[in-house]
Image (cartoon, coloured by chain):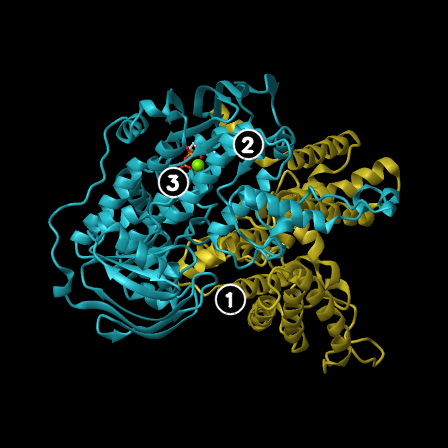
Chain colours: A yellow, B cyan
Amino acid sequence: MQKKILKQFIEFGIARSIIVLFVIVLFILAILKDMQIAELISDSLARIGRNGILVLALLPGVRGGIGLNFGLPLGIICGLIGMLVGMEFDWTGLSGFVSALSIAGGLGVLAGWGYGVLLNKVKGQEMMVGTYVGFSIVSFMCLLWLLLPFSNPKLIWALGGKGLRVTISLADYYPKILDDFLSFSIFNVTIPFGSLLFFVLFCFFVSLFFRSRWGRAIAATGANAQFAKANGINPNQTRVWSAVLSTVLAAIGIVVYNQSFGFVQLYTAPLLMAFPIIACLLIGGAEVGRATITHVILGTVIFQTLLTIALPVTSAFIGGDISETARIIISNGIILYALAGVKGKTA
Amino acid sequence: MSLVLELKNISKSYNGNPVLKGISFALQKGEVRAVIGENGAGKSTLMNIIFGMPVIHQSGGFEGECLIDGHVVNFQKPQHAMAAGLGMVHQEFMLIPGLKVSENIKLNREPLSSKSFNRFLPGKLKVIDNEQIHKDSLKALQKVGMDLDPDQLIKGLSVGHLQFIEIAREVDHQNLKVLVFDEPTAVLTESEASQLLNTIRHLAKDLGIAVLFISHRLDEVKEIADTVTVLRDGELIGNYRCEDLDKKEMARLMVGRAVNIRRDQEQESPNARQNIMTLKNFSVRMPGENLQDIDLEIKQGEILGIGGLAGQGKLGLANGIAGLMPASGNVIFEGQAFSLNDPKQALQNGLGFLSEDRKQTGLLLDESITHNICFTASHVLGRFQNRFGLFDQKQGKEWAQKMIKDFDIRCTGPEQHTRRLSGGNQQKVCLARVITANPKLLFVSEPTRGVDIGAKKIILDFLRSLNQQGVTVVLTSSELSELRVLCDRIAIVASGKISEILLPEDSDERFGLAMAA
Ligand SMILES: Nc1ncnc2c1ncn2[C@@H]1O[C@H](COP(=O)(O)OP(=O)(O)OP(=O)(O)O)[C@@H](O)[C@H]1O
Ligand SMILES: [Mg+2]
């Protein structure tokens, strides 16, 4: 039994243990400074529910052998379009939210399919090409956001301008529709029940999917494409599926994210979204070639909690706002660390 | 005589499972010592310890002492072991396909040009002497008895050649004292293997290099070794002089009981039966193993052997039918046209394939034994699935347990990942996976490669009993003796054609001629 615990600790990894320790220290500091612990925990929970599905969206890519999906912005854009279409027609509340999810999912299938076909042409360089795809689609959409024929005054620039606004409030549509669903408070901690439930449900479905024949074919391709081929699987096909799945989940993920956040952010906002999301998964213990649902959940919890409490605690001590810089340093540092780790092993 | 390598009481465990318990022996200059034992007995682990391979340190090091020239050593990296005069010819080739033969041989030890400007260049930027590379590698190739152009690219050479280049690379070390071979002949044909044995003898007797030699082929051990170390389940059974043991005795020491591989006598003539598969103008494009326009009939219920030298095309047949290598021609299976280049269709029609390349094609290394064994049946036939179409863990595990028992797979349980298994046990997992899908026509390539003599008997007996249950078997093997033990007819492939179809009782000369055709 003890051996098992020790083994699990080793598997948990030194880097991750340090980060968890750091989070605990931050909590203790927060208590010492008499800060609102309940509020910090509520914020952390809200962020976990908000980001969870986006992190989950990386899983099919890693399992299917296309690596960390740096092309996440592609799915995010699909999600944004899904939301905007419904908002243009003033679909609000549940119907607005559901229509956003469905349009997002549908677009995600199309975009993911094209993306997968592209990735098949650049085997071995998926992550780099994915990054370029992400950047290109965001720049391209910067143009389209200006040109698309949206006319709802809540969406376009005031004073008769043309084009969509940079930030659009969801206040009249479905703000926190999931966060507030069956949400409750204990010890002053607000539990965003709907969002967490949604996240857990999706994790459950994805893990079931990977126990199905289809999912196992995808995972086998990622693990050993030659093996997959010998077992009658077409590796090019399964790689496309994993790209589709990842893109669809990203599209759904951003809808969930935005309802909780309360705003839709356009233009360059999706550009850098992939990086902190990827950091989440890696902090959870995933590697470029291996990721599990546990990694997804653990990583989201650790990283989002860290981000939430690091800001107020450090600014309470240092007296300045270093949050954004810290976030960028931490997330990109983790990605670099993980990628370097991979190189180290194969060399 | 002087001792070059001495092991004292070496013990090692992985995650608390002991795999070596108190192994000791000493190796003298010019001595050839064979290390034999069943699959999973700990032979490779012992070599990894001597060599300081990273797996050993990552899993908590080892106990006991390893001495070289009388000094205790504990290499942290293989590079240190090489610097101290150890060389290892790995089971998996570590050559760079895009480089020339000579560049591979001299990799990391390139001689520097003696031109004067070279003195002024900083270390890593010094210019290399290409002529010297050419000369040195030619010398090394001659030492191992290979007649090969050092300027040729590695890409496209046969496995046999690669093996010799790998050895030449080690021999090129100036101060080479001990050379370790981990199953060097497993991938070679018999004639190549005997050339290798000559080379080893030359290295030991004429150059005074001490050799550690791991092999499951006891004939070779008998032929080449001076001394024999026998391991069983990680324990040292004993160190013997080779002339004191005969082959039977060796097998008995390894396995703990007597083993005999013999041909059953009653055989019926296969010609009376109808064809299960007919090939016409069948060609396969497989690098190094091309087949051109062959015609072949596979009879219902027979065991057909495919033999021949490496690089002649015998591996192309199974890979072509399996759809893993581009194939063309006219194939009829059970009276119907068979669609080529479609692995899924082939499997669904009831064909089974055991690839000769277990690591690349045969295994999911980071999945459990259960998942590996059930994969083909579950994916192609939809077995091991519960009502919701999900993989049924319980059913799969039960089946895996049965297979582990039937094939005597040495493991910690069905949950163990196949990466952690010894080579021979990985092979058994592959075979278990293939037969789990209940094929009607089974293509097996090199099924006993790297498998110990006890397990070899299990596998061969198993193939025979499958055959008695009505499965047609096409066995591709580089071991003629194995083909003769099992097959009804043996087709010999030479230069991409079938040169002759022989019977197992035909003379060695006829087989030799057919192979050389
Ligand atoms: N990396 C590893 N982690 C855990 N166990 C291992 C590892 N490598 C080998 N083992 C175990 O150690 C034992 C000895 O394995 P080893 O590879 O030394 O056998 P071997 O004698 O070389 O067998 P073979 O003839 O099949 O190659 C086996 O039971 C194997 O399962
Ligand atoms: Mg071995």
Residue B54 seen from this side: yes
Quarter holding the C terminus of chain B is bottom left
Can you give x and y, in whole percent of width and height, for residue B79 in the image? 64, 34
Disc 1 + disc 3, Cβ < 8 Å? no
In this picture, is B110 found above or below B496? above
Element type where label 3 sits in the image: helix
Q: Distance from label 2 to label 3 (Cα)? A: 33 Å
Q: 10 Å neighbourhood of mark 3: few (<14), some, or many (≥20)? A: many
Q: Mark 3 points at which residue?
A: B424
Q: Which amino acid does label 3 sit on?
A: Gly
Q: Do tags 1 and 3 sit on the same chain?
A: no
Query: Which one is earlier in the sequence, the residue at label 2 or at label 3?
Result: 2
Q: In this view, does A42 lie to the left or right of A194?
A: right
Q: Residue at x 77, y 48 (%)?
A: A327
Label 1 chain ID? A
Disc 2 + disc 3, Cβ < 8 Å? no
Q: Nearer the viewer, mark 1 or mark 3?
A: 3
Q: Name the residue under label 2.
A: B207
Q: Is mark 2 within 8 Å of ligand 2?
A: no
Q: Which residue is drawn at 39% across and 22% down?
A: B235
Can you give x and y, in whole percent of width and height, for residue B406 in the image? 26, 40
